[in-house]
Image: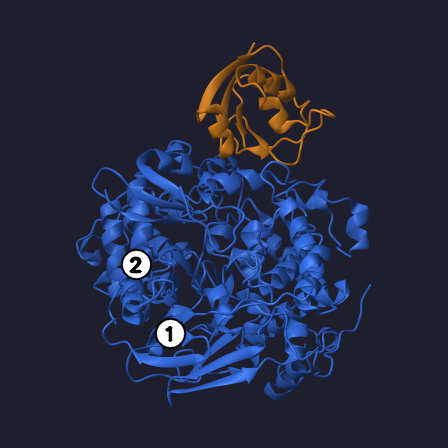
Amino acid sequence: MLFLYVKYAGHISVVTGKLKEVIEMKGETVYDLLRELDRKYPGFRDIFINPEDGIPNLRTAISLQRSGECASQILDPKFKLKGGDNIMLW
Amino acid sequence: MRSNILPKEDERMSQKWYGWKGTILRVNLTDRKVTKQELPLTWARNYIGCRGLNSKILFDEVKAGTQALSAENKLILGTGPLEGTPIGMGRMSATTKAVNGRLGEGGLGGFFGPELKFAGYDFVVVEGKSDTPVYIWIKDEEVEIREAAHIWGKTTWETERIIKDELGDQDIQIRSIGPAGENLVHAAVLIGNLNRSGARAGFGEVMGFKKLKAVAVRGSGGVQIAHPDDFEETYGRIRKELDLKKSPDMWTAAWGIMGGGMLARIFSQLGNLQTFNAQRMRWDEHADDIGIEAIMTVCEVRPKSCFCCPFPSATKWFEIKEGPYSGTVGENSSALELFFTSILGISYVPAALKARSLCNQLGVDAFQAAYSIGWAMECYQKGILSKGDMDGLELKFGNYEAMLEMIRKIAYREGFGDVLADGVAKASHQVGKGSERFALTIKGQELEGMPQRNFYTAALGLATSEAGPDHTRWYPPYPCHPAVVSPEVLKSLNVDIDLASAFIPRKAEGKGGLLKWLTTSRAILESLPFCVFAIRGTLGIDLRVWRDAIEAGTGMDLTYEELIAAGDRIMNLERAFIVREGFRREDDTLPRRMLEEAVPDCHYGPLTQETLDGMLDEYYEARGWEKKTAIPRRGKLEELGLKEVIDEFEQLGIQER
């Protein structure tokens, strides 16, 4: 199980109704995280991934901050996450 | 593909102007004369309007060596051919010569630009100097210079109310200065619609010197469109890129719904948030307290947009509902309230909103106030300045009460406020003791919010801007995604940038070429005008839709190549303006903090002079400017038909080495 610190910015915070939370998930990729969030907030995954082709759309962004370093953007949904990662979605 | 674009001979398109009104209004404050000049068609074709044409008028009429604070300097308020249509979105340009010779150009939003078009004018050029305070009143073809002694000293909000009551019309559009402009405070701004501020590059100061308090306008006409059906179709294509659900841009929905205030938390996570006068670039412990999400919990907020803006929520009207600043109203647009938070170590957001409102009423530039006070706070932190030096105010990071009092002192040049009122570059030279190192200015102008050590495109853009640090001259500073436009399409458009490389923030290679495209395209868009904060998706990369918009709106058959050449011409003319004043490559630089200091909380180093030099070389090469001096080469000027610049350089002995 991975414990991730997930933050929601901009209009995504309106979708979730919160600024941040800790997510516990079984998978290890960004795609797995989106699937987990989709369970909590139905339709969430489709905000980030085109349902037709499973490819990340250009309308949203995901950034990762790890081990105290500054964040950088993730473009590949297969990117592997680690426990303790900070992810921001907008 | 290159083409030699030479100015065509003056000719009439038809008996009637479409888009443009074809009229420049000239108001002379010395002899109190008003004249109307026909807009030369050649100018419209080669510079489009708004910012581009403002720069043309300034270059031609305010010569090298003219003192900024003199009757010979001019104030130019400009609109463009698509102003007054949904594309123009109320944007306008205000241009003058700044006190240190910089190009004093800035954009503003709101509703003044369309009203000026409806009154029948593309430009207002103010010349001379009045002995007594005045304001200009434009009502269609009637233009008056009216006495303003009764509003001199009033805030911008009081000024709007008084003028509207006096003239008996609440729908008048007004641009005015506050006490800051009257007191010749450095970077004093022009304010309109209560909270639309702009023209921080010197306009407010010059207006105050000329004793011009305000310009008020009311128009009963409209804007004539050459091909309405085509215009509607083209506008539909533009709006598709701005659709909140479908726009191919990660910022469209975020910005359109929440506005720039959402940047606080994102920037902090990315290491882009200027904190404690940019000593740090993250403020994770307080980022949640200062963004728009926090503002919405302490204030009543409502959407408040400019003319025809597709993002009505990007700017929000607010009213603070509780606490010591309860009842304070204002607007937060872009992310200006950030400057009264992280830069100054203040996490109490109502105080930041109070500061924003105060700046707008007094006509103080929020950036200038924030970075001047931030510098003073760092001086206090380092023991360079004491409470006694600052009128007994404990200007330390986090002290918002002291911040608010100092903003007022800056506007009225009281005590230590008089020191800061001349700008932080001068203040730091006056105080010395190493404080110059963290006076965050470029070409004498205080920074804005764009990070530099972590974002090389922004760094290069700020360093080279002819108007001082002004991100609107290249905003947005990124392609929104490397896949937004294919390499094949870029090649067909003759856009020579590698999008994938451009997307890497701390990779220096390629940034020069990228900046050339960003500045050229934004020069075009700001001249239409179009709001840079709505440049999303492909709108800033594929300019064919804008060529179509110009033809549909005005009937002018500019080719795509001619459109790009117009942007290039504007950039070269603006560079020539500051070259004429003595600016050279060494002035295209960054604050020492950015070049020399690492960012410990973000694990990245300073940008370094060596890195900046590499990017400057690349940018000048792309521009066709001499690398050693940043002077536009003769061949480039000839290509663009800028004979007047060549002649003037020869007269002044300005030569390529």
Residue type, label 2:
Gln
Q: Quadrant of the C terminus of chain B?
A: bottom right
Residue at far bottom of view? B31
Q: Residue at x 46, y 42 (%)?
A: B273
Residue under numbered circle 1: B207
Q: Chain of mark 1?
A: B
Where, by quadrant of the figure, is residue B100 drawn?
A: bottom left
Q: Quadrant of residue B414?
A: bottom left
Measured from the top left, where is residue B82 in percent x and y? 59, 63
Chain A shade? orange
What residue sits 51% from the left and 84% below the top?
B36
What chain does badge 2 belong to? B
Colour scheme in use = by chain
Q: Separation of disc 2 and disc 1 at Cα?
A: 16 Å
Mark 2 or mark 1, earlier in chain: 1
Residue at horizontal 68 percent and vertical 28 percent from the top? A50
Left or right of residue B319: residue B228? right
The answer to whether any part of residue B579 appears in the image is no
Q: Hey, what amino acid is under mark 1?
A: Met
Q: Which residue is mark 2?
A: B361
Q: From the image, which quarter does the N terminus of chain B lie in?
A: bottom right
Q: Secondary structure at mark 2?
A: helix
Measuring from the top left, give residue B545's x and y in whole percent: 70, 55
Chain coloured blue in this rendering: B
